[in-house]
Protein backbone atom coordinates (compact mmCIF):
# COMPACT_ATOMS: atom_id res chain seq x y z
CA UNK A 1 0.00 0.00 0.00
CA UNK A 2 1.35 3.40 -0.91
CA UNK A 3 0.45 6.36 1.24
CA UNK A 4 1.11 8.89 -1.45
CA UNK A 5 3.04 8.32 -4.63
CA UNK A 6 5.16 5.22 -5.13
CA UNK A 7 8.42 4.37 -3.40
CA UNK A 8 10.72 1.39 -3.33
CA UNK A 9 9.66 -0.76 -0.39
CA UNK A 10 10.48 -4.03 1.27
CA UNK A 11 7.45 -6.28 0.79
CA UNK A 12 6.00 -7.48 4.12
CA UNK A 13 8.86 -6.30 6.35
CA UNK A 14 9.84 -8.59 9.22
CA UNK A 15 9.31 -7.07 12.65
CA UNK A 16 10.15 -8.54 16.06
CA UNK A 17 8.14 -7.18 18.99
CA UNK A 18 9.27 -7.58 22.58
CA UNK A 19 5.73 -7.43 23.70
CA UNK A 20 3.32 -7.60 26.58
CA UNK A 21 -0.02 -9.32 26.92
CA UNK A 22 -2.64 -7.72 29.12
CA UNK A 23 -6.34 -8.34 29.56
CA UNK A 24 -7.57 -4.78 29.12
CA UNK A 25 -10.71 -3.58 30.85
CA UNK A 26 -12.07 -0.16 29.91
CA UNK A 27 -14.99 1.84 31.26
CA UNK A 28 -16.68 4.75 29.49
CA UNK A 29 -17.64 7.55 31.90
CA UNK A 30 -18.91 11.11 31.59
CA UNK A 31 -15.71 12.40 33.16
CA UNK A 32 -12.60 10.90 34.70
CA UNK A 33 -13.07 10.00 38.39
CA UNK A 34 -11.63 11.98 41.27
CA UNK A 35 -9.91 10.40 44.26
CA UNK A 36 -12.38 8.42 46.35
CA UNK A 37 -15.20 8.80 43.84
CA UNK A 38 -17.39 6.09 42.32
CA UNK A 39 -18.96 6.77 38.93
CA UNK A 40 -21.59 5.04 36.83
CA UNK A 41 -20.10 3.74 33.57
CA UNK A 42 -22.00 3.98 30.29
CA UNK A 43 -20.11 1.02 28.81
CA UNK A 44 -17.59 -1.61 29.85
CA UNK A 45 -15.28 -3.58 27.55
CA UNK A 46 -12.90 -6.47 28.14
CA UNK A 47 -10.45 -7.35 25.37
CA UNK A 48 -6.94 -8.72 24.77
CA UNK A 49 -4.44 -5.88 24.91
CA UNK A 50 -1.13 -4.64 26.21
CA UNK A 51 1.15 -2.23 24.41
CA UNK A 52 3.24 -5.07 23.00
CA UNK A 53 0.25 -6.99 21.69
CA UNK A 54 -1.18 -3.80 20.19
CA UNK A 55 2.09 -3.09 18.37
CA UNK A 56 2.23 -6.65 17.04
CA UNK A 57 -1.41 -6.71 15.92
CA UNK A 58 -1.18 -3.23 14.39
CA UNK A 59 1.93 -4.12 12.41
CA UNK A 60 0.50 -7.45 11.26
CA UNK A 61 -2.70 -5.85 9.95
CA UNK A 62 -0.58 -3.45 7.90
CA UNK A 63 1.18 -6.34 6.20
CA UNK A 64 4.20 -6.82 8.44
CA UNK A 65 5.51 -10.32 9.05
CA UNK A 66 5.51 -10.17 12.84
CA UNK A 67 7.26 -12.34 15.42
CA UNK A 68 8.08 -11.62 19.04
CA UNK A 69 7.75 -12.57 22.68
CA UNK A 70 4.61 -12.22 24.81
CA UNK A 71 4.44 -13.44 28.42
CA UNK A 72 1.33 -14.95 29.99
CA UNK A 73 0.63 -16.58 33.34
CA UNK A 74 -1.14 -19.81 34.26
CA UNK A 75 -4.39 -18.23 35.46
CA UNK A 76 -7.78 -18.23 33.65
CA UNK A 77 -6.94 -14.98 31.82
CA UNK A 78 -4.05 -16.74 30.03
CA UNK A 79 -6.57 -18.83 28.07
CA UNK A 80 -7.56 -15.70 26.13
CA UNK A 81 -4.10 -15.21 24.63
CA UNK A 82 -3.99 -18.05 22.10
CA UNK A 83 -7.31 -17.19 20.43
CA UNK A 84 -6.31 -13.51 20.30
CA UNK A 85 -3.08 -14.30 18.45
CA UNK A 86 -4.94 -16.61 16.10
CA UNK A 87 -7.50 -13.90 15.27
CA UNK A 88 -4.69 -11.45 14.55
CA UNK A 89 -2.68 -13.84 12.38
CA UNK A 90 0.23 -13.88 14.81
CA UNK A 91 2.33 -17.01 15.50
CA UNK A 92 1.44 -18.99 18.62
CA UNK A 93 5.18 -19.34 19.26
CA UNK A 94 5.24 -15.75 20.48
CA UNK A 95 3.71 -16.86 23.80
CA UNK A 96 5.90 -17.74 26.78
CA UNK A 97 4.12 -19.09 29.86
CA UNK A 98 5.14 -18.43 33.46
CA UNK A 99 3.50 -19.44 36.73
CA UNK A 100 1.44 -16.67 38.31
CA UNK A 101 -0.98 -14.04 37.03
CA UNK A 102 -1.38 -12.74 33.50
CA UNK A 103 -1.06 -8.99 33.02
CA UNK A 104 -4.25 -6.97 33.43
CA UNK A 105 -5.24 -3.32 33.22
CA UNK A 106 -8.13 -0.92 33.66
CA UNK A 107 -8.75 2.30 31.76
CA UNK A 108 -11.33 5.09 31.94
CA UNK A 109 -12.42 7.10 28.90
CA UNK A 110 -14.44 10.30 29.32
CA UNK A 111 -17.00 11.95 27.06
CA UNK A 112 -14.28 13.87 25.20
CA UNK A 113 -12.38 10.68 24.42
CA UNK A 114 -9.56 11.39 26.90
CA UNK A 115 -8.34 8.55 29.08
CA UNK A 116 -6.30 7.39 32.02
CA UNK A 117 -5.27 3.85 32.84
CA UNK A 118 -3.28 1.58 35.12
CA UNK A 119 -1.68 -1.75 34.26
CA UNK A 120 -0.47 -4.61 36.45
CA UNK A 121 2.32 -6.31 34.48
CA UNK A 122 1.86 -9.82 35.88
CA UNK A 123 3.83 -12.30 33.78
CA UNK A 124 5.20 -9.53 31.56
CA UNK A 125 7.59 -8.50 34.33
CA UNK A 126 9.10 -11.99 34.36
CA UNK A 127 10.47 -11.91 30.82
CA UNK A 128 14.24 -11.73 31.16
CA UNK A 129 17.50 -12.06 29.28
CA UNK A 130 17.31 -15.86 29.16
CA UNK A 131 13.99 -15.88 27.30
CA UNK A 132 15.27 -13.21 24.92
CA UNK A 133 18.51 -15.10 24.18
CA UNK A 134 16.46 -18.16 23.29
CA UNK A 135 14.85 -16.04 20.55
CA UNK A 136 18.15 -14.52 19.32
CA UNK A 137 17.98 -16.05 15.83
CA UNK A 138 14.43 -14.75 15.36
CA UNK A 139 15.50 -11.26 16.46
CA UNK A 140 18.46 -11.28 14.07
CA UNK A 141 16.21 -12.19 11.12
CA UNK A 142 14.04 -9.10 11.61
CA UNK A 143 14.16 -5.82 9.72
CA UNK A 144 13.14 -3.77 12.77
CA UNK A 145 12.93 -4.71 16.46
CA UNK A 146 10.38 -2.99 18.73
CA UNK A 147 10.11 -2.77 22.52
CA UNK A 148 7.99 -0.95 25.08
CA UNK A 149 8.12 -0.63 28.83
CA UNK A 150 5.49 -3.15 29.89
CA UNK A 151 8.55 -5.42 29.69
CA UNK A 152 11.47 -5.06 32.11
CA UNK A 153 14.81 -3.38 31.49
CA UNK A 154 16.72 -6.66 31.41
CA UNK A 155 14.60 -8.05 28.57
CA UNK A 156 14.62 -4.78 26.61
CA UNK A 157 18.39 -4.33 26.96
CA UNK A 158 19.14 -7.88 25.83
CA UNK A 159 16.72 -7.67 22.89
CA UNK A 160 18.28 -4.43 21.65
CA UNK A 161 21.83 -5.71 22.24
CA UNK A 162 21.14 -8.74 20.03
CA UNK A 163 19.41 -6.60 17.41
CA UNK A 164 22.20 -4.04 17.14
CA UNK A 165 24.88 -6.77 17.04
CA UNK A 166 23.00 -8.21 14.05
CA UNK A 167 22.83 -4.80 12.37
CA UNK A 168 19.07 -4.38 12.93
CA UNK A 169 17.35 -1.10 13.74
CA UNK A 170 15.49 -0.77 17.02
CA UNK A 171 12.44 1.24 18.08
CA UNK A 172 11.64 2.03 21.71
CA UNK A 173 8.34 3.35 23.06
CA UNK A 174 9.17 3.90 26.77
CA UNK A 175 5.61 3.60 28.03
CA UNK A 176 4.54 3.28 30.82
CA UNK A 177 7.32 5.81 31.36
CA UNK A 178 10.47 5.15 33.30
CA UNK A 179 13.84 6.65 32.50
CA UNK A 180 15.59 4.18 30.18
CA UNK A 181 18.94 2.85 31.31
CA UNK A 182 21.83 4.44 29.38
CA UNK A 183 22.63 1.16 27.59
CA UNK A 184 19.05 0.88 26.34
CA UNK A 185 19.06 4.43 24.95
CA UNK A 186 22.47 3.83 23.39
CA UNK A 187 21.06 0.83 21.50
CA UNK A 188 17.84 2.63 20.46
CA UNK A 189 17.68 3.89 16.87
CA UNK A 190 14.11 5.28 16.93
CA UNK A 191 12.53 6.75 20.07
CA UNK A 192 8.77 7.41 20.12
CA UNK A 193 7.26 9.30 23.07
CA UNK A 194 4.11 11.26 23.77
CA UNK A 195 4.01 14.77 25.24
CA UNK A 196 3.80 13.54 28.84
CA UNK A 197 6.76 11.22 28.33
CA UNK A 198 8.72 13.99 26.60
CA UNK A 199 8.16 16.22 29.62
CA UNK A 200 9.36 13.41 31.91
CA UNK A 201 12.50 13.05 29.81
CA UNK A 202 12.96 16.80 29.98
CA UNK A 203 12.75 16.78 33.78
CA UNK A 204 15.21 13.89 34.04
CA UNK A 205 17.70 15.49 31.65
CA UNK A 206 17.25 19.03 33.02
CA UNK A 207 15.83 20.20 29.69
CA UNK A 208 12.44 21.65 30.68
CA UNK A 209 9.51 21.38 28.27
CA UNK A 210 6.60 23.77 28.77
CA UNK A 211 3.35 21.98 29.61
CA UNK A 212 0.86 22.01 26.74
CA UNK A 213 3.30 23.26 24.12
CA UNK A 214 3.03 21.91 20.57
CA UNK A 215 5.64 24.09 18.86
CA UNK A 216 8.59 22.20 17.34
CA UNK A 217 11.07 24.75 18.72
CA UNK A 218 9.99 23.86 22.26
CA UNK A 219 11.25 20.30 21.79
CA UNK A 220 14.45 20.99 19.80
CA UNK A 221 16.82 21.03 22.76
CA UNK A 222 15.28 17.94 24.31
CA UNK A 223 15.43 16.06 21.00
CA UNK A 224 19.10 16.97 20.66
CA UNK A 225 19.83 15.76 24.18
CA UNK A 226 18.08 12.47 23.46
CA UNK A 227 19.85 11.95 20.14
CA UNK A 228 23.17 12.53 21.88
CA UNK A 229 22.40 9.48 24.01
CA UNK A 230 21.75 7.10 21.11
CA UNK A 231 18.62 7.51 18.96
CA UNK A 232 19.06 8.96 15.48
CA UNK A 233 15.32 9.67 15.20
CA UNK A 234 13.10 11.09 17.96
CA UNK A 235 9.33 11.27 17.35
CA UNK A 236 7.05 13.12 19.77
CA UNK A 237 3.30 12.51 19.47
CA UNK A 238 0.95 15.30 20.52
CA UNK A 239 -2.51 13.76 20.25
CA UNK A 240 -4.88 16.00 18.31
CA UNK A 241 -1.95 18.31 17.52
CA UNK A 242 -0.18 15.62 15.48
CA UNK A 243 3.46 14.62 15.81
CA UNK A 244 6.93 16.08 15.39
CA UNK A 245 9.98 14.14 14.19
CA UNK A 246 13.56 15.17 14.86
CA UNK A 247 16.33 13.63 12.78
CA UNK A 248 19.98 14.65 12.94
CA UNK A 249 20.97 17.17 10.28
CA UNK A 250 17.39 17.88 9.19
CA UNK A 251 14.79 20.43 10.26
CA UNK A 252 11.94 19.25 12.47
CA UNK A 253 9.21 17.50 10.50
CA UNK A 254 5.63 18.22 11.57
CA UNK A 255 2.88 15.69 10.84
CA UNK A 256 -0.63 17.10 11.49
CA UNK A 257 -3.27 14.84 12.97
CA UNK A 258 -6.18 13.82 10.76
CA UNK A 259 -9.37 15.65 11.82
CA UNK A 260 -11.62 12.85 13.05
CA UNK A 261 -14.19 12.68 15.84
CA UNK A 262 -12.44 10.96 18.75
CA UNK A 263 -14.54 8.37 20.56
CA UNK A 264 -11.77 6.64 22.53
CA UNK A 265 -8.08 7.59 22.50
CA UNK A 266 -6.88 4.39 24.18
CA UNK A 267 -4.45 2.65 21.83
CA UNK A 268 -3.94 5.62 19.50
CA UNK A 269 -0.27 5.86 20.39
CA UNK A 270 0.25 2.14 19.83
CA UNK A 271 -1.46 2.34 16.44
CA UNK A 272 0.72 5.33 15.51
CA UNK A 273 3.90 3.50 16.53
CA UNK A 274 2.91 0.34 14.64
CA UNK A 275 2.24 2.39 11.49
CA UNK A 276 5.54 4.25 11.83
CA UNK A 277 7.42 0.97 12.32
CA UNK A 278 5.88 -0.69 9.26
CA UNK A 279 6.40 2.42 7.17
CA UNK A 280 10.08 2.78 8.03
CA UNK A 281 10.77 -0.97 7.83
CA UNK A 282 9.14 -0.98 4.39
CA UNK A 283 11.63 1.61 3.14
CA UNK A 284 9.24 4.57 3.06
CA UNK A 285 10.70 8.08 3.45
CA UNK A 286 10.12 9.52 6.91
CA UNK A 287 7.35 11.96 5.82
CA UNK A 288 5.39 9.11 4.28
CA UNK A 289 5.91 6.83 7.28
CA UNK A 290 4.67 9.60 9.59
CA UNK A 291 1.57 10.12 7.47
CA UNK A 292 0.84 6.40 7.62
CA UNK A 293 1.36 6.45 11.39
CA UNK A 294 -0.99 9.40 11.87
CA UNK A 295 -3.64 7.69 9.74
CA UNK A 296 -3.40 4.56 11.91
CA UNK A 297 -3.87 6.61 15.07
CA UNK A 298 -6.86 8.41 13.55
CA UNK A 299 -8.49 5.11 12.59
CA UNK A 300 -8.31 3.82 16.16
CA UNK A 301 -9.76 6.86 17.96
CA UNK A 302 -12.97 6.65 15.93
CA UNK A 303 -13.93 3.40 17.73
CA UNK A 304 -14.27 2.10 21.26
CA UNK A 305 -11.62 -0.39 22.26
CA UNK A 306 -8.32 -1.15 20.61
CA UNK A 307 -7.95 -4.74 19.42
CA UNK A 308 -10.68 -4.64 16.77
CA UNK A 309 -10.04 -0.96 15.99
CA UNK A 310 -6.40 -1.39 14.92
CA UNK A 311 -6.64 -0.77 11.16
CA UNK A 312 -5.70 -2.94 8.23
CA UNK A 313 -4.44 -1.59 4.90
CA UNK A 314 -7.94 -1.11 3.54
CA UNK A 315 -9.06 0.98 6.53
CA UNK A 316 -5.99 3.21 6.28
CA UNK A 317 -6.43 3.61 2.53
CA UNK A 318 -10.07 4.61 3.02
CA UNK A 319 -9.18 7.24 5.60
CA UNK A 320 -6.43 8.67 3.40
CA UNK A 321 -8.73 8.72 0.40
CA UNK A 322 -11.24 10.73 2.41
CA UNK A 323 -8.52 13.14 3.55
CA UNK A 324 -7.08 13.70 0.07
Image (cartoon, rainbow, N blue to C red):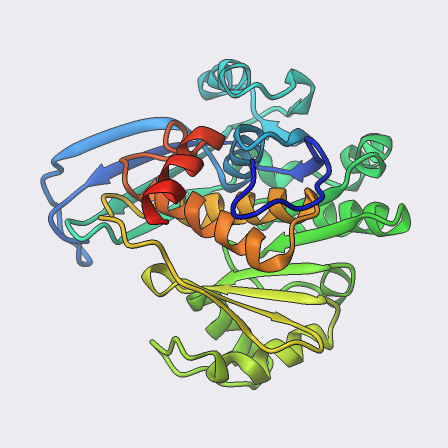
Q: Position of residue 168 (x, y in %)?
A: 81, 47
Q: Position of residue 50 (x, y in %)?
A: 48, 37
Q: Is residue 175 left or right of residue 118?
A: right
Residue occupying image coordinates x 54% and y 14%: 86
Q: Nearer the viewer, residue 282 or 67?
A: 282
Q: In the displayed structure, would residue 180 be above or below residue 294?
A: below
Q: Is residue 110 left or right of residue 195?
A: left
Residue at the far right in the pictured view: 165
Q: In the displayed structure, would residue 231 be above or below residue 84?
A: below
Q: Position of residue 165 (x, y in %)?
A: 90, 50
Residue occupying image coordinates x 57% and y 49%: 276
Residue occupying image coordinates x 43% and y 67%: 195
Q: Position of residue 175 (x, y in %)?
A: 52, 54
Q: Nearer the viewer, residue 221 or 103?
A: 221
Q: Is residue 269 left or right of residue 34?
A: right
Residue occupying image coordinates x 58% and y 29%: 60
Amino acid sequence: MSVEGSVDMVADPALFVLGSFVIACSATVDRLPRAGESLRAQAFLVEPGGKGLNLAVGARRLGGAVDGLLAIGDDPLAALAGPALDRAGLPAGMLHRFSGPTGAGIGFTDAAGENCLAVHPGANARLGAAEVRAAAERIARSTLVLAQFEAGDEAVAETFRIARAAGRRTLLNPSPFRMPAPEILADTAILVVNAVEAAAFGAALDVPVSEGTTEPAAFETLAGALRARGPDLVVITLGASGAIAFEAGRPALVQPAFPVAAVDTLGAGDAFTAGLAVGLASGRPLPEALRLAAACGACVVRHKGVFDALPDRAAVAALLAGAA
